[in-house]
Amino acid sequence: MHRRGAGIAAIKNKNLAQARYKDKGTEIAEGQVAQMAKQMETFKVHLENFASQHKEEIRKNSEFRVQFQEMCASIGVDPLASSKGFWAEMLGVGDFYYELGVQIVEVCLATGHRNGGLIGIEELRDRVVKSRGKKSQDISIDDLLRAIKKLKVLGNGFSVISCGRSYMVQSVPGELSMDHTSVIQQAQNSAYVTVSQIKKNLNWETERIHRALDYLVKEGLVWTDKQSSETQYWFPSLFAGAMNAS
Amino acid sequence: MDRFEWIDFSLQPGESNVISQSGVALYDGPDKTSFNDGLMVLTTHRLIWKDTLNRSRVLAVSLSLVVRIEEQPSGFAKSAKIEVHLQKANSGKAPGPVASSQHDYVRLSFRNSGEVEFYRYFMEQLRERRWEKTVPPADPVSGGGARNRPGIMGIERSIQHKQRDMDMNISQSFKDLRMLMEKAKEMVQLSKTISTKIREKQGDITEDETVKFKSYLLSMGIADPVTRETHGSGDKYFTELARQLAAVLEKPLQECGGIMTLSDVYCRVNRARGMELLSPEDLLNACEMFEFLKLPVRLKTFDSGVMVLQLLSHSEEEVVRQTQALLKDKESLTAEELAQQLGLSVILAKERLLLTEKMSKACRDETVEGLRFYPNYFVTK
């Protein structure tokens, strides 16, 4: 049979059909993602259950333990889910508080880039509870404080600061904090900073700003100037640069 | 037992022998049967039993019917057994020795032992599922041309089918721990597939930064953590632990600029160990061994009582050399400038400068404008 060349109508039809195929393709792909998300949720629930119910058995079988951990890693499930139990409650022994310690440090590390290593205890609790998964029992502030106390043997790197009725947890000690460096960067052009200026530029909490500035003052790295309405913190080391800039 | 078929012993296309063991008796569930002495053959497709005396008595069951298998160790006057759990056979099955059975499993009793090897190969075959991979006999013309190129409906149907299979597989595998252990490899693969797919589409598995971080830490697992159970409780435990810690921590330490607080270490190490939790005391004890064992990581305590681990390459000579080079480059430095140069905190930068001074590689200029360090021209010029 002789094959006719395609006319304009045919081309239009073809384009239309292609557009439809594309729509359909996107639709299917979206459906698949939704399905995947559902499967991931199922996976998560199962893994959480197993972690809390079969801890000992999983620990015993080394090959399986590695595989279990791999699954937890790809789905983002916490394999540590001991419940508090009688002895932990009474004597503070057992894995419960150690596990909590790991989870607390983890939250602090994960949020450190945002809060500079200073976190309110309520926020800490919310995050720990969330990361332990749905199966976890409730964690009280007291539990957190106990768990942090267990970390004391590891030096002063991790400390609880009491402020008013609440607590703050500091996970980055003064020696290692990057906050000072950030403050200096703020002072780069003018050789001085003010609290409100830092607040505006870095969006830090007042508590954190004062901590950084006080430390610099104490170390003799900045001088204070209280003549203007708001205290200015001057960096003598940046005087020369500021002169050149202006 | 009703799942077995009588066969004449010949292999199907694509099928091959895996392992065979003589002196095997078949049990229907818990009950003995007349098939009490035969050669058990495992092929890539079937489990075949051949009577030792009467060579024409040959039974087979397809591996596709096997749900799971279980080892039962031998006991006093009892041979080791493998329990094979089977699903219902298809309706088109050839006649077998038993028309119906109330048991969903059979037991293979290994009177001449050999069960350990058999079990291992059996598991391997169940994992590989070779019987699925052979081309099924072509459906005689029924679908015609339309079968060859499925339309959109066909694609959708096959996707749906695949997803249903996957759902089934997940819920089956998590029925109990033993099932999960058997299917672990497959499930690990599946969990990875799911998370990569989601990552492709959405960028990340979750918005929650803690969960993201956790997932990252967990993925650096230690395959074989040192425990008190494996290494006793004395010095041996701590020395081995110290060696493992040093090996595991070297890379994260490098990423963190060569220094990490002990509480960070505690978190990272325990995440990598998974469920084998380490107590803070044990961690500290192991870290104290680093110097004695000449490992490339050192425990350091600051005056303020903060404890950190440092890489040895982060050691004094290296620091001094680096600082000296920078001083030469910039002509002079304050702690703040060095901090900015290296992306360190000011306090650490100051320590570096003081150390360099102590090693007589720098000189200080202390004025009202703060403390400034210069290269030591007294020595170099």
Image (tube, rainbow, N blue to C red):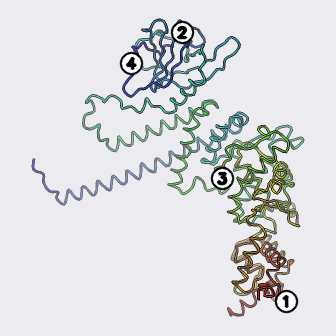
What is the distance, in whole Å, between disc 3 and disc 4 at their CAs?
55 Å
Name the N-terminal-most of marks 2 and 3: 2
Q: Residue at x 36, y 26 (%)?
A: B13
Q: Say yes or no: labels 2 and 3 on the same chain.
A: yes
Give the residue type that dot 1 points to.
Thr
Mark 2 Cα shell of 10 Å, populated few (<14), some (14-19), many (≥20):
some
User: Mark 2, mark 3: which one is toward the viewer?
Assistant: 2
What is the distance, in whole Å, between disc 2 and disc 3 at their CAs?
56 Å
Task: Report the residue marked by disc 3.
Answer: B211
Name the N-terminal-most of marks 4 and 2: 4
Q: Where does the image place residue B190, in percent across and percent down from the top left?
A: 54, 42
Chain of the residue displaying label 2: B
Instruction: Indicate which disc residue B10 carries.
Output: 4
Give SS at disc 4.
loop
Task: Report the residue marked by disc 2.
Answer: B37
Give the residue type that dot 4 points to.
Ser
Circles 2 and 3, Cβ within 8 Å, touching? The answer is no
Name the N-terminal-most of marks 1 and 3: 3
Circles 3 and 4, Cβ within 8 Å, touching? The answer is no
Horizontal relation, residue A134 to residue B153: left or right: right
Mark 4 Cα shell of 10 Å, populated few (<14), some (14-19), many (≥20):
few
Q: Say yes or no: labels 1 and 2 on the same chain.
A: yes
Q: Where does the image place residue A111, in percent across and percent down from the top left?
A: 70, 61
Mark 3 Cα shell of 10 Å, populated few (<14), some (14-19), many (≥20):
many
A146 shown above or below B21 = below
Give the residue type that dot 3 points to.
Val
Q: Say yes or no: labels 4 and 1 on the same chain.
A: yes
User: Mark 1, mark 3: which one is toward the viewer?
Assistant: 1
Instruction: Indicate which disc residue B367 carries.
Output: 1
Name the N-terminal-most of marks 1 and 2: 2
The quarter of the rendered structure image containing the C terminus of chain A is bottom right
Mark 1 Cα shell of 10 Å, populated few (<14), some (14-19), many (≥20):
few
